[in-house]
Image: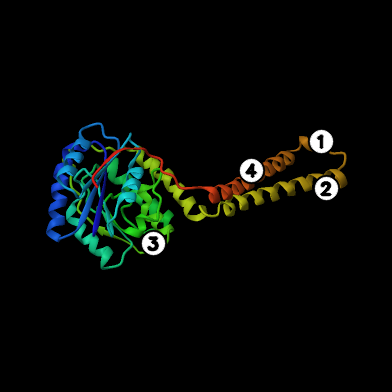
């Protein structure tokens, strides 16, 4: 199979049939053997009924329906697990991503040898205040923090080698950082392609300004995981040892001063150096223990899905 198209969605009943016809037209005109995987992330409208009808009449259409809304990352994880194509394409279901981009994305993976190609919406049809400006700030911070030089981390239109999606775990809200996860997994041949961005035709956006707050928090997480995810003791152990050393130095100073230099001075527990020593040693012990526990958890952790599939459709 040439291509697996993975489309997570939430309440997009108005656009699904039109999106399918658009994708099918592009696939057939290019002679691709493909599958189309819809992941219904807990829709409350008629989205699943449309997916079922499409699957019954078009064998290339498959569907996964979640028990409730788990988020885009979980939807992509489920789609990646099911995908069988040599190249996996992800896109949104709101008709703002153009299927006309798929053939070139496919060629960039198969002919140019890229591991991952991310779409770049250079010209957007979103609100400047609520989406464009926060998105630019977010992407700038993501580039500087992760070292992955992409202009648009949030673009849902991306292409992957099959090995990439089978080698990464997309959990939490890490769908924004799949290129970073891929890089951390050893797939460093990452590129981007300017893509068309369509104005929303039906419904309203499912994302508000709060997604950028979550995005920046996730950015801190991904930075930590990138640098210390496989060696937490290197961070917590180093800071713990430093704090223990500081605390020991203050304690040593207090002991020498009280015993040999100024025995008649006020009680040690009444001096500020005592509290600095005590605090530093307690913090150092906790940090060191956190690093040690992190190492134990890392070695005992087993990957597990954190979503419940209600039903599936398609072979």
| Above or below, 148 relative to 313 | below
| Above or below, 188 relative to 271 | below
Q: CA distance from mark 4 to mark 2?
A: 26 Å
- Give the residue drawn at x 34%, y 50%: 81
Q: Position of residue 101 (x, y in %)?
A: 20, 56
Q: Earlier in the sequence, mark 1 or mark 4?
A: 1
Q: CA distance from mark 4 to mark 3?
A: 36 Å
Residue linked to disc 3: 187
Residue 203 visible in the picture: no
Circles 2 and 3: CB atoms closer than 8 Å: no
Circles 3 and 1: CB atoms closer than 8 Å: no
Q: Nearer the viewer, mark 4 or mark 3?
A: 3
- Give the residue drawn at x 42%, y 55%: 146
Q: Nearer the viewer, mark 1 or mark 4?
A: 4
Element carrying mark 2: helix
- Give the residue drawn at x 29%, y 35%: 42
Q: Nearer the viewer, mark 4 or mark 2?
A: 4
Q: Earlier in the sequence, mark 4 or mark 2?
A: 2
The residue nearer to you, when weighing 157 against 120, is 157
Residue linked to disc 2: 256
> In the figure, is residue 210 to the left or right of 302?
left
Q: Position of residue 84 (x, y in %)?
A: 29, 55
Element carrying mark 4: helix
> Mark on residue 267?
1
Q: For the N terminus, which image quadrant?
A: bottom left
Q: Position of residue 231 (x, y in %)?
A: 55, 54
> In the figure, is residue 203 to the left or right of 176?
left
Q: Earlier in the sequence, mark 4 or mark 3?
A: 3
């Amino acid at each position: 199979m040439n291509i697996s198209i993975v489309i997570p969605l939430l309440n997009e009943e108005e656009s699904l049939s039109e999106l399918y016809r658009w994708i099918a037209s592009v696939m057939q005109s290019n002679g691709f053997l493909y599958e189309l995987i819809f992941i219904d992330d807990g829709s409350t409208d008629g989205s699943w009924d449309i997916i079922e009808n499409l699957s019954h009449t078009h064998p290339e259409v498959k569907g996964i329906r979640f028990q409730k809304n788990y988020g885009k990352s979980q939807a992509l994880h489920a789609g990646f697990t099911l995908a069988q194509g040599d190249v996996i394409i992800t896109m949104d279901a709101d008709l703002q991503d153009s299927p006309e981009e798929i053939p070139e994305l496919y060629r960039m993976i198969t002919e140019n040898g890229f591991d991952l190609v991310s779409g770049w919406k250079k010209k957007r049809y979103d609100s400047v205040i609520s989406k464009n400006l926060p998105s630019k700030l977010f992407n700038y911070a993501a580039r500087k923090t992760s070292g992955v030089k992409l202009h648009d981390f949030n673009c849902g239109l991306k292409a992957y080698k099959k090995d990439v999606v089978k080698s990464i775990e997309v959990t939490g809200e890490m769908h924004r950082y799949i290129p970073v996860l891929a890089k951390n997994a050893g797939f460093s041949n990452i590129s981007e392609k300017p893509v068309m961005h369509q104005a929303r035709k039906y419904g309203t956006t499912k994302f508000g300004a709060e997604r950028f707050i979550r995005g920046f928090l996730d950015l801190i997480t991904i930075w930590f995981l990138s640098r210390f995810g496989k060696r937490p003791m290197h961070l917590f152990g180093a800071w713990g040892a430093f704090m223990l050393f500081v605390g020991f130095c203050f304690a040593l100073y207090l002991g020498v001063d009280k015993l040999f230099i100024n025995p008649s001075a006020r009680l040690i527990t009444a001096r500020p150096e005592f509290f600095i020593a005590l605090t530093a040693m307690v913090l150092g012990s906790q940090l060191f223990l956190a690093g040690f526990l992190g190492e134990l958890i890392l070695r005992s952790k087993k990957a597990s899905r954190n979503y419940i599939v209600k039903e599936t459709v398609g072979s």
